[in-house]
Image (tube, grey):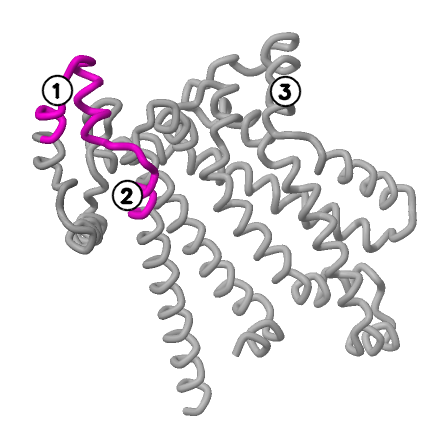
Amino acid sequence: MRNTKEIGKRICKRLLNFILVVWGVVTLSFCLQVFTGTDPAEMIVRKVNVLATEEQIQAVRVSLGLDAPFLERYTDYIKGVLTGDLGTSIINRQPVIENIKDALPVTCALIMMAMVWVVLFTVLLSAVSVIRKGGIFDNVTRVVCIIGICVPSFWLALILLTVFAVRIPIFNVIADGSLKSLILPSAAMAVPIICIATRVLRAAVLNELKSDYVTYARARGFSNAQIVYGEVLRNALPAAITLFAQYCAALFGTSALVESVFSIQGLGIYLMKSCESMDIYGISGSILVCGVLFVSLNALADVLCGIICPAYRRKAA
């Protein structure tokens, strides 16, 4: 009964924190619209008529409710977010939420494939590096990770495109929406994260190897591989899982450069085009979606860490 109450209390606490953070993200998104110094009404009118008068601009401003008091506009914005209304894009005069719905799926597929590479290679490389600590594999992995951390994703994307789509035409130069066309861009996005996560997970595993239960397991005759794969890796995963979630969420907002190299019309490209056109509704809507995804993925990582690692669950309680 006591454990049930503690679990319920912990869930309520995390849910409250999640709601507060999301509210903060929504508020920042609204402030982005209000305090950027860009007048959406003028942008809309000037796009149609460069010589528009102030009266015409004011009429559009009134129709959009931009002349209303701050609190009224904030309340209307909150209501709009709750109903899925993020405003109308200045670029194509379509609802921002529809533009995001069109762009988000391909970005989600790209990031999911990238994170599959990250999980597979990070766990494999860090575990082998720990088992063969100080050996050739560990030293080579360390050098490769240091280089990989310093390599920009867009530069790596250009190299992969040149080699595997131009010199060796295994893949298409322009993505056609298939899973095969996402392999190169997902690899370009995954490599820097793999290098960082491998170093983090390796350090966490080595720190975990100093624990008393590892000494006891060795005394019972368990091999280093059995200890690492059996208990140590599971207890060291929370640091890597948190890192995975943060990078996965960050990729939604920073995928524009890789998407532009491979001509992928995803969320990053939409955000970049909105910035180029000073589409304040498109910018704030995209940032709002990225912010909510960031908070959601971090909350999911917290729950997953508690499920995988009992020690983390006790620490978070």
> What residue appears at the point 46 percent right and 87 percent down from the top-left corner?
3
> What residue appears at the point 17 percent right and 15 percent down from the top-left corner?
48
Instruction: Give residue 224's quadrant in the image.
Output: bottom right
State the CA–CA distance, disc 3 to disc 1.
51 Å
The secondary element bearing badge 2 is classed as: helix
Answer with left or right where residue 136 lies relative to residue 30: right
Q: In which quarter of the image is the N terminus?
A: bottom left
Classified by dominant secondary structure, the portion drawn in magenta counts as helix
> What residue appears at the point 69 percent right and 30 percent down from the top-left corner?
151
Q: Earlier in the sequence, mark 2 or mark 1?
A: 2
* Residue closer to the observer: 42 or 104: 42
Instruction: Give residue 315's quadrant in the image.
Output: bottom right
Mark on residue 34?
A: 2
State the CA–CA distance, disc 2 to disc 1.
22 Å
Residue 214 picture location, percent across and down: 80, 73
Circles 2 and 3: CB atoms closer than 8 Å: no
Q: Which of marks 2 and 3 is nearer the N terminus?
A: 2
Circles 3 and 1: CB atoms closer than 8 Å: no
Magenta residues (range) = 30-58
Q: Which of marks 3 and 1 is nearer the N terminus?
A: 1
- Where is 275 relative to 229, above or below? above
The secondary element bearing badge 1 is classed as: loop
- Where is 112 relative to 264, above or below? below
**In this rendering, which labeled residue sits more in front, label 2 or label 3?**
2
Q: Which residue lies furthest to the front in this view?
A: 54
Q: Mark 1 points at which residue?
A: 53
* Residue closer to the observer: 108 or 282: 282
The secondary element bearing badge 3 is classed as: helix
Mark on residue 160?
A: 3
* Residue closer to the observer: 38 or 243: 38
Q: Residue furthest right?
A: 135
